[in-house]
Image (spheres, grey):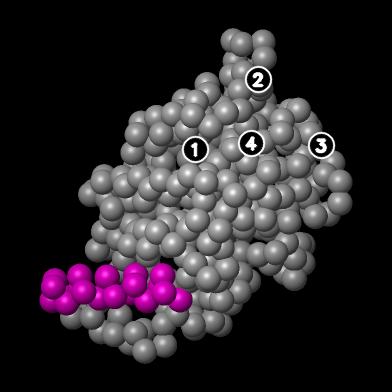
Amino acid sequence: MRAIVLLIGLMLASFASAGGISSMEKVRLGGVEQMIGIHGADTSKPLLLILHGGPGFSELLLFRSYNRDLERDFVVVNWDQRGAGLSYDPQMPASSLRISQLASDAHELVSLLKQRFGRNKIFLLGHSWGTVLGTLLARDYPGDFYAYVGVGQMTNTVENERASLAFVLDKAHKDRNAKAIRELERLRHNYPSAGQKGLEDLKAQRAWLLHYGGVFYGDMNSAKLFAGVSSEEAALYRNAHGAEGEAVSLAILWPELLGLDLPRTARSFAVPVYFLLGRSDYNTPWELARKYFDQIEAPHKEVLMFERSGHFIPFEEPAKFNQFMRDLASRNR
């Protein structure tokens, strides 16, 4: 379906450049209104579409707070996917939350952006869950993209979860933490699984993963991460149903995600591929992403390790991340 742009007139900032853009807009993708933010100092710069994590975890307020420097080198598009952030609608049919539908929404958005800004190609970045959609788009529509960047790249969900559990269980044993060992050993024989029990197990595992440093590097944590969010972005999302959208999105998509196997279904690409991996990331274990990277065929591919990051590279090491993206733009246009 042709995407219809509905400018809602919300301006967050103004740029000195007459060619700049700073807007929040609703677009209709797959028949559902969804929110995008478009920000850049110069609209002649290359387009960068960011696919957020989750499922259902909007990251516009984080990218705009930690990575705003990119708006000098790109026109940066942050998209709240159906079911996420400012796009969350409790009336949306649960049946529409499918990987195929979200990938279709993303492709429709790419086409809209190319047409609107008169571009043949754009840059594509996925973070965490967003790497699922990013990988599928890069595989199926290589002509749309200068390059694909996977940050915290997902691979095979079952292998991912088993490796993550093994990491945190090893940490618990070394720590002689009886409570953690008891809770994690209880999960081990049927992890991961679908259904409400599977989601509860996932939540329990992630709580211990956070405790044992498998999500962030060093002393970074969620409170510190969001303490760095700028006031204007915080205000924009103050009344958003972020937690509800994330819970609903994960609950609906989790059974389908358990069947995900990108190393089997997405190995060959006709577009440059870059993986950015955090050395402390065991949310999407970096070793599995590196193994997947080695299996990929692409006209050009690179992997870059971030030694002082866990799962949230753009916000844990923003200067290094921003510099990589700027260099990428200059090399691939």
Left or right of 177 on screen, residue 187: right
Do the residues under discs 4 and 3 have CB atoms within 8 angstroms?
Answer: no
Q: Nearer the viewer, residue 186 or 40?
A: 40
Kind of residue sitting beneath label 1: Phe
Do the residues under discs 2 and 1 have CB atoms within 8 angstroms?
Answer: no
Kind of residue sitting beneath label 4: Ile
- Marker disc for residue 63: 1
Asked whether residue 28 is in view, the answer is: yes
Q: Nearer the viewer, residue 1 or 267?
A: 267
> Which mark sits nearer the N-terminus, 1 or 3?
3
> Which mark sits nearer the N-terminus, 4 or 3?
3
Residue 166: x and y, percent?
A: 29, 75
Kindly identify the residue that appears in the image at 63 percent across and 41 percent down. 145
Q: Quadrant of the C terminus?
A: top right
Binning the other alpha carbons within 10 Å of mark 1 as few (below 14), some (14 to 19) or many (20 upward) gives many
Q: Spatial distance from mark 2 to mark 3, Cα to Cα?
A: 22 Å
Q: Which residue is mark 3?
A: 6
Residue 210: image quadrant is: bottom left
Left or right of 300 on screen, residue 265: right
Residue 50: x and y, percent?
A: 57, 43
Residue 192: x and y, percent?
A: 45, 80
Do the residues under discs 4 and 2 have CB atoms within 8 angstroms?
Answer: no
- Marker disc for residue 122: 4
Q: Which residue is mark 2?
A: 44
Q: Spatial distance from mark 4 to mark 3, Cα to Cα?
A: 22 Å
Residue 247: x and y, percent?
A: 56, 65
- In front of the other: label 2 or label 3? 2
Which secondary structure lies at badge 2? loop
| Residue range corresponding to the magenta coloring | 158-177
Q: Spatial distance from mark 1 to mark 4, Cα to Cα?
A: 18 Å
Residue 173: image quadrant is: bottom left
